[in-house]
Every structure is written in C-alpha cells, then in structure tokens.
C-alpha cells in the first residue's frame, strides 16, 4: 500500500564544505530521509563521497540515511557503509553479478535493502527479488548528476511497480529520484511513489522548509 509521502533531500545539491550543518538544517526543515548519492566515476560519470563522509555526518542527525550506491563492484563496499551508519543501502542490479546475494548481505548487516532501476532498466528486473526488498528506487533521470529533467516514461514504471508491490502485501518504499519538483512530485505520487528524492528542488533559493513543504503538496 502506498504510504504517506516522505521527502528525501539529496545532499548532492548541498554545500559540500558545510555538509554537517546542511544536514542539521534539512532535519529542522522537515526532511524524512537524508539521501546520500555515492558515485565512483565508473558506474556513473561522477565521483562524490564514500563511507568516511557518511561516518562523519552520522552524529549530525537521527534521520534515516538513505544511501544510494552508484558504484561497481558494489559488494566489497557494503560492510564499510553499514559500519559508517547507513540505514538503507540501495544498489543497482547492474552493479554486480548476483543482486540477490547483495540484497541478502545488506539485510544480514541489519540494514534496509533497496534496488534501483535506471531509466532504461525494466521493472521486471526485480520480479524475483521484490519480496526481499524494503525499497525500490526508480531513477527518473540517468544517474550521475543533479539538476536534470524528469523522464516522463518512468511514470509507467512507477505505476507497474506500485501494482507489483501491493501484490506482495508488504511495506516496500517506492522512491523516485531525479528531476523532482512540485509538478513532477504530484505526478510521481499519483503514479504510486511514496518517497521523493529531491536535490535541486530542496536547496533552490535556500528556504528548505518551504521547499520541502511544496514537494509534499502543501
Ligand atoms: C542522480 C542522483 C540524484 C540527484 C537528484 O544521480 O541519484 O539523487 O541528486 O538531483 P535532482 O533532484 O537535482 O534531480
Ligand atoms: Zn540518488
């Protein structure tokens, strides 16, 4: 069942020189999750942060750390992100040869496990692991950069996944990431999403609370 909407600001659009402060400001502004985009310059054409930064940020908030791993191979890094204080680890099925094993490992570490689908990756990629997941992340842009435009075709994928998730009878977050603003947020929620990642739209203009409220539809 679709849950109440939660907002997951992506720190990709934060001031990286003041990340701790930025995260505290996001918590005060009403964020639900902190979305941390981990990029390796190999799986995606950009490099961001690793477990050391996650660990340094951990004391700054009690909010859920929603860590989006855009790295390959991903398996050798799972333990380090768990130790650093991640709450959710989301992986792309293309980032390793055995996604089922990767998901099991994340769960064995005591974390919530997510799987993410690139715009070109079909929903059916998750058919045989869906019941194992705590979160499905639909990429509505090609991963690597903030500030890109929402790809409309992903709404159909969200609709299809909403149905598949509901069929499991389990509570699995359906998160959408990329090009989310007040308009695309409404469309993604209508399609069945219940967690919205937003980088640009959260940080734009500096009033994080107003921006987050707008994404919720307030
Ligand atoms: C892109 C990242 C996103 C990104 C979203 O690879 O996964 O989380 O920060 O940025 P906006 O909201 O600006 O599209
Ligand atoms: Zn992301």
Image (spheres, helix red, strand yellow):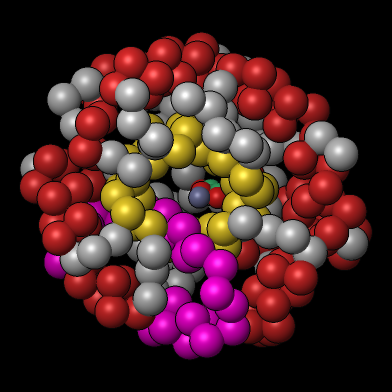
Is residue 123 left or right of 95 when viewed as pictured? right
Front residue (pair 208, 204): 208
Question: Across the whole image, how many numbered discs are drawn on residues?
Answer: 0
Instruction: State the extent of the magenta-drawn residues as a range.
Output: 52-76
Q: Where is residue 112 in the image (x, y as percent from the top left)?
A: 32, 54
Is residue 212 left or right of 160 when viewed as pictured? right
Q: Position of residue 158 (x, y in %)?
A: 49, 21
Quadrant of the rendered structure where residue 110 is? bottom left
In the rendered image of this protein, does residue 42 appear above or below residue 5? below
Quadrant of the rendered structure where residue 100 is? top left
Is residue 28 left or right of 197 when viewed as pictured? right
- In the image, is residue 68 part of the stretch drawn in magenta? yes
Quadrant of the rendered structure where residue 88 is? bottom left
Image quarter hosting the C terminus = top right
In the rendered image of this protein, does residue 93 appear above or below residue 183? below
Residue at the extreme front of the image, as rendered: 169
Q: Where is residue 5 in the image (x, y as percent from the top left)?
A: 64, 38
In the rendered image of this protein, does residue 54 appear above or below residue 134? below
Tell me if residue 44 can be seen: yes
Tell me if residue 41 can be seen: no
* Residue at 56% over, 22% down: 192
Front residue (pair 126, 41): 126
* Residue at 53% over, 27% down: 2
* Residue at 66% over, 18% down: 190
- In the image, is residue 64 part of the stretch drawn in magenta? yes
* Residue at 56% over, 68% down: 63
In the rendered image of this protein, does residue 94 appear above or below residue 158? below
Q: Position of residue 174 (x, y in %)?
A: 47, 33
């Amino acid at each position: 069942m679709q849950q109440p909407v939660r907002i997951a600001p992506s720190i990709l659009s934060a001031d990286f020189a003041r990340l701790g402060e930025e995260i505290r400001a996001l918590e005060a502004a009403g964020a639900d999750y902190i979305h941390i985009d981990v990029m390796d310059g190999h799986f995606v054409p950009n490099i961001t942060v690793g477990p050391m930064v996650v660990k340094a940020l951990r004391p700054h908030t009690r909010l859920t750390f929603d860590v989006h791993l855009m790295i390959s191979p991903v398996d050798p890094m799972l333990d380090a992100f768990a130790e650093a204080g991640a709450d959710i680890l989301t992986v792309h099925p293309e980032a390793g040869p055995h996604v089922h094993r990767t998901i099991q490992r994340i769960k064995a570490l005591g974390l919530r496990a997510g799987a993410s689908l690139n715009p070109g990756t079909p929903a059916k990629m998750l058919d045989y692991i869906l019941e194992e997941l705590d979160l499905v992340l639909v990429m509505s842009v090609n991963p690597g950069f903030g500030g890109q435009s929402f790809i409309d075709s992903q709404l159909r994928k969200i609709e299809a996944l909403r149905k598949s998730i509901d069929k499991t009878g389990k509570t699995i977050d359906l998160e959408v990431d990329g090009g989310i603003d007040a308009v695309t947020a409404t469309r993604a929620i209508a399609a069945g999403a219940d967690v919205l990642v937003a980088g640009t739209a959260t940080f734009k203009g500096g009033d994080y609370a107003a921006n987050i409220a707008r994404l919720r539809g307030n």
